[in-house]
Image (tube, rainbow, N blue to C red):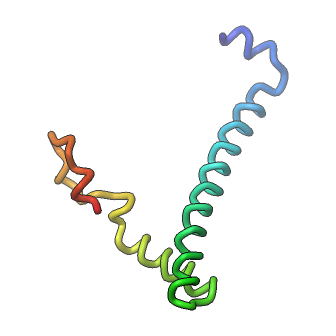
């Protein structure tokens, strides 16, 4: 495989572009998830888009429960998912 990559011109460029585009796809996917919740908040509570997006982003970033469980609580366990919500 290494011999093949040496023969391909710009192989490092394509490698960097692949991972850059992978990160970009992840970011746009995350923005899509945020948009669904922010849109629902704006419709239900008659908020502006800016207010609902800021509110949800603030709650999500400060709670941390959607991404980071409490350290030390998951060791040796595989049934922690119900506790996250």
Vertical side of 2 occupied by 61: above or below = below
Q: Measured from the top left, where is residue 75 in percent x and y? A: 17, 44
Q: Quadrant of residue 14?
A: top right
The residue lying at 52 percent from left, 71 percent from top is 37
As drawn, which residue projects farthest toward the right?
9
The residue lying at 51 percent from left, 89 percent from top is 45
Vertical side of 1 occupied by 48: above or below = below
Q: Measured from the top left, where is residue 81 in percent x and y? A: 26, 51
Q: Measured from the top left, where is residue 20 in percent x and y? A: 68, 44
Name the residue nearer the viewer: 29 or 70: 29
Name the residue nearer the viewer: 36 or 68: 36
Q: Is residue 67 left or right of residue 46?
A: left
Q: Quadrant of residue 38?
A: bottom right
The residue lying at 62 percent from left, 48 percent from top is 23
Quadrant for the N terminus in the image: top right
The residue lying at 82 percent from left, 27 percent from top is 10
């Amino acid at each position: 495989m290494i011999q093949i990559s040496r023969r391909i011109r710009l192989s490092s460029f394509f490698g960097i572009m692949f991972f850059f585009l992978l990160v970009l796809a992840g970011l746009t996917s995350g923005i899509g998830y945020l948009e669904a919740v922010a849109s629902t908040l704006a419709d239900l509570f008659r908020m502006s888009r800016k207010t609902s997006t800021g509110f949800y982003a603030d709650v999500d970033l400060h709670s941390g429960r959607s991404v980071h469980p409490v350290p030390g609580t998951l060791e040796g366990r595989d049934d922690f998912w119900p506790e996250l919500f």
